Amino acid sequence: MNNHSEIFLGTAFSSRSPKEIAICKDYLFFINAEGVIERMVAPDHAEYQQLLRTCENAENFHRLADGQYILPGFIDLHVHAPQWAQSGTALDLPLYDWLHEYTFPLEAKYADLSFAKNVYEDLVGTLLANGTTTALYFATIHKEASMLLAEICAERGQRGLVGKVVADDTEQNPPYYRDADSKTALEDTEAFILAVKKLAKKVKQGVYPVVTPRFIPSCTDEVLKGLGELAAKHNTHIQSHCSESDWAHQHVLERCDKHDAFALHDFGLLSDKAIMAHCNFLDNEDAALFAETGTAISHCPLSNAYFANSVLPAARFKALGVDIGLGTDISAGGTASLYDNAKQAVASSRMLEDGVDPALPAERRGVPGSRITMNEAFYFATAGGGESLSLPIGRIEKNYAWDVQIVDTKVKNAKLPIFDSNEDLYDIFQKIMYNVRPENIRQVWVQGEKVHERN
Ligand code: GUN
Ligand code: FE
């Protein structure tokens, strides 16, 4: 057994499909030296008892305690790392005012690397403590501070996908916070891509550069076209905001005479490695274009409630074949927790189902078929995120990375409401999704390495 770097014995929950949870009760999990799940053995397997006897006294054997469960680490598909410093403020402003009064002045401060280090170290630690093993980050326009974020992810063992933000339009961005010009923005982006790729060679869990136009309104046509070319040249991930709010969607329609989806496509910014935040106002044609190009949606239900005043029709877009993952949208979502967002994804979808003005005639009250289950919200936070990024993460299955959170339902002062020692495991799964706090997350592992522990 010594050729395995870690062996675990415990009960795990993972998505079998968007609607179905796989429950692996008392399985043995063998993790290889690369941090990948090599073998999973069920208790009824002929070799189980013998395997258990051989490995149970080994130093690398981990037996979960009673009341502990293994879940895949969460994949946060939309985080503005610099905005962590304002999380929980100004959530009642309109998006445009929030950007100009709060967000741009804050993001401008990341020219100062010591300020950036302070916030970014705290954020990466906080996300890990909340069970987030992979994050897709917007940094700021600053090349150096963006690089610092990638280095902190590398050091702390989080799988980080990081973008230097591009915002070069002189009308939409304030003079104190924008790229010097489109040429400099493209040169800085390419230098950033190369630097992150160089760093990645030394990082077990992976760090990845991401081409990151903030959103169409903040960028010139020239820079958007150049960024599409850079993403193709270096085969990188791409991220932006797409059809988020009435204001943003309308702005693009007036400027480009088409929806964001088709405009982004024309600039070469939709691909199998592209992830677009929000997407509340996609129509079915836009969604079909996403499905055809492999572009994913990062669903940010809390942020959508605060700033887009809207609910993503997630069930409809999933049925149209679009990849969907979940995002906190720090700081527009007001929390670092994907548990909070999974709960909100379920709640918001029910409001879309029939929660409109009761005075309306029945046929105009909501959209039947909109409701999603917690199984689907969990899928978005895990397997759906992995599919969106085209990486083998987000499932507890052979050949997937050992990216997990070990949840303890019996922590003192943070016990989950489980009173029956034979409680149905699917009920326990649901209680975990609705009740877990960081206090319950005992350990977090990324690519077979322990990166967080709470005693
Ligand atoms: N649109 C452009 N920038 C942002 C941002 O930072 N947050 C959100 N929610 N929407 C945006
Ligand atoms: Fe955002």
Image: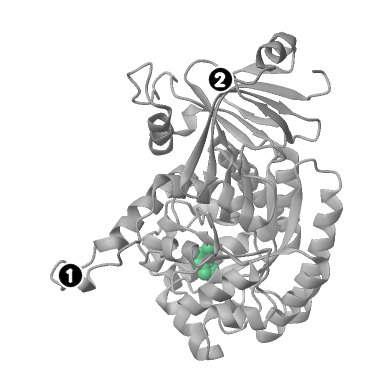
Q: Which mark is residue 455?
A: 2
The answer to whether the residues at label 2 and label 1 have Cβ atoms under 8 Å apart is: no
Secondary element type, mark 1: helix
Occupied quadrant, residue 410: top left
Tell me the kind of residue under disc 1. Ala
Occupied quadrant, residue 3: top right
Residue drawn 79% across the image and 65% down it: 235
Q: Give the position of the N terminus as an image quadrant.
A: top right
Q: Nearer the viewer, residue 331 or 292?
A: 292
> Residue 29 appears at what percent x and percent y?
67, 26
> Residue 297 appears at what percent x and percent y?
54, 63
Secondary element type, mark 2: loop
* Residue occupied by mark 1: 362
- The mark lying in front, picked from 2 and 1, is 1
Q: CA distance from mark 2 to mark 1?
A: 53 Å
Q: Give the position of the C terminus as an image quadrant.
A: top right
